[in-house]
Amino acid sequence: MNIVVIGTGYVGLVSGLGYAKLGHRVACVDVDVAKIAALDLGEVPFYEPGLRDLLREMQEQGRIVFTTDLYSVADGAEIFLIAVGTPPTAFGEVDLRAVFHVADDIGKCLDHEAIVAIKSTVPVGTNRKVLDCVREKMIAIGRENVSRCIQVASVPEFLSEGKALEDFFAPHRIVIGAENYTTHDVMGRLHAGLPGTRICTTLENAELIKYAANAFLATKISFINEMACIAERVGADIQTVAHAIGLDPRIGPSFLKAGIGYGGSCFPKDVSALHQLAGLNGYDFKLLGAVIEVNNHQRDWFLRKIENRLGSVRGRKIAAWGLAFKGGTDDIRESAALDIIQRLCARGAEISVYDPFAMTRAHGLLSDDIVFAPTAMDAAEGADALVVLTDWQEFRDVSFSTLRERMVNPLIFDGRNLLADMHLSGLGFQYEGVGTSG
Ligand SMILES: NC(=O)c1ccc[n+]([C@@H]2O[C@H](COP(=O)([O-])OP(=O)(O)OC[C@H]3O[C@@H](n4cnc5c(N)ncnc54)[C@H](O)[C@@H]3O)[C@@H](O)[C@H]2O)c1
């Protein structure tokens, strides 16, 4: 099939390359000129394992092209897949400007039957509005007859950054929302060759499934974080508790890691958007309100933990390991790590940071006073305390006996319980995890 993917971020690029690998001819479009130029040269402008190799393979085979000009690749395209960002506005609503901008552009250049499919996470009802927008544009330029043949499909994305390609090629399910059998069938053929249960359903169901999935995972995280607070108070260990309850298949082991809370480009905005959607429809989704509150509280609680131990952090040298919102990605959007670093800095701490992949992105966002160290060990040189904020495997591989010598005060606050099983107190460290004594 001939497809056009609009937006070449984490979702659009992974999907575009994935569909190309499945045998489709793919054109990727983005407004970001530098990004398209880099991709054209075989460079991926963000960190995602395996993507660069697949990009070069698909380019060599001539199965994918990159452009900033939608018009140049619209001819003959059967599916226009929208994968642009849907960030939150200052008021916590979903900013759909990019989605409708693209819908406008598609309407202006579309002169043949096609499907407009939305992969971006959008509130319930958006797919229908996008279809109306595309059709209106077509009618305005005298293409009323063809406009009736345009269909819309909701194909929400469930990939997880850090293992995005793995998720693309081995999805747990493929959700396709559409209004008729033909559209379901075409979208099904787009995904031919992929495993995973097909859920062919309505537009509204597909849109809500995506929010429900993220809200549920965020709820698990806030639940285990509250359990960690209790564990600390009663002298229990949250890691053991989480492991034991996770063995029950009705609960499952994932998203039961206590820590400084969820962040990233999806959970915070999607949970808030669902909470708002409920409110707008006259329903007070109390549980989600609590999920958000617990998540915010978790960062305050971690900062208090540090201050309780150190007294004031003013003038204290604190090493921070991690900037990305989780290990395996360079994405720092809504990163709890960044927030905690900024708040420590605002309280007068002298911060030295290290992250294996997210340093470039964080430059310019953090205060000039913060030192970007070339290695994890360098960041910890002369530190009064070390805070672990992102769960990078690399942090487990440092020599802790050397680290013990390089720090002034061997005190570790582990916001991800990453080092909890490493018996660091035996090496002379004072270790504080989240709901665990390590
Ligand atoms: N990142 C994830 O892990 C993830 C997972 C599932 C779903 N999603 C959803 O997928 C969507 C995209 O997320 P992302 O992380 O890939 O975003 P991103 O910010 O990484 O990428 C969005 C891209 O769209 C481009 N863009 C913006 N306006 C455009 C326009 N008018 N025309 C063409 N390109 C345009 C931007 O330049 C950017 O390259 C969001 O709705 C997000 O919620 C993201």
Image (tube, rainbow, N blue to C red):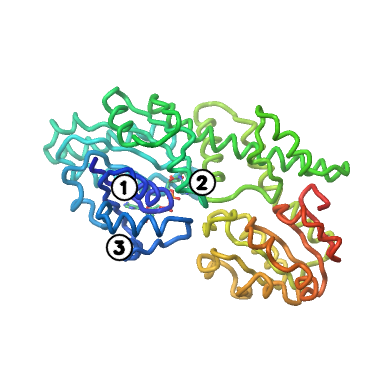
For badge 2, the amino acid type reads Ser
Q: How many marks?
A: 3
- Label 2 sits on residue: 160
- Label 1 sits on residue: 20
Q: Mark 3 or mark 2, which is nearer the start of the sequence?
A: 3
For badge 1, the amino acid type reads Ala
Can you say whether 163 is above or below 252 in the image?
Answer: below
**Picture quarter containing residue 373?**
bottom right
- Left or right of 325, for residue 3: left
Q: Position of residue 361 (x, y in %)?
A: 51, 65
Whether disc 2's CB lies below 8 Å from ligand 1 is answered: yes
Q: Position of residue 251 (x, y in %)?
A: 67, 31
Q: Secondary structure at mark 1?
A: helix
Q: Secondary structure at mark 2?
A: loop
- Label 3 sits on residue: 40
Q: Closer to the camera, 166 or 437?
A: 166
Please report the residue visible at 71 percent of the width from the left and 54 percent of the height from the top: 418
Q: Secondary structure at mark 3?
A: helix
Q: Residues within 10 Å of mark 2 (few under 14, many from 20)?
A: some
Q: What quarter of the picture does the N terminus occupy?
A: top left
Q: Closer to the camera, 252 or 9?
A: 252
Q: Closer to the camera: disc 1 or disc 3?
A: 1
**Picture quarter containing residue 367?**
bottom right
Q: Position of residue 114 (x, y in %)?
A: 22, 36
Whether disc 1's CB lies below 8 Å from ligand 1 is answered: no
* Labels 2 & 3 near each other (Cβ < 8 A): no
Please report the residue visible at 19 percent of the width from the left and 51 percent of the height from the top: 71
Q: Mark 3 or mark 1, which is nearer the start of the sequence?
A: 1
Q: Mark 1 or mark 2, which is nearer the start of the sequence?
A: 1
Between the residue at mark 2 and the residue at mark 3, the CA separation in whole angstroms equals 25 Å
Whether disc 3's CB lies below 8 Å from ligand 1 is answered: no
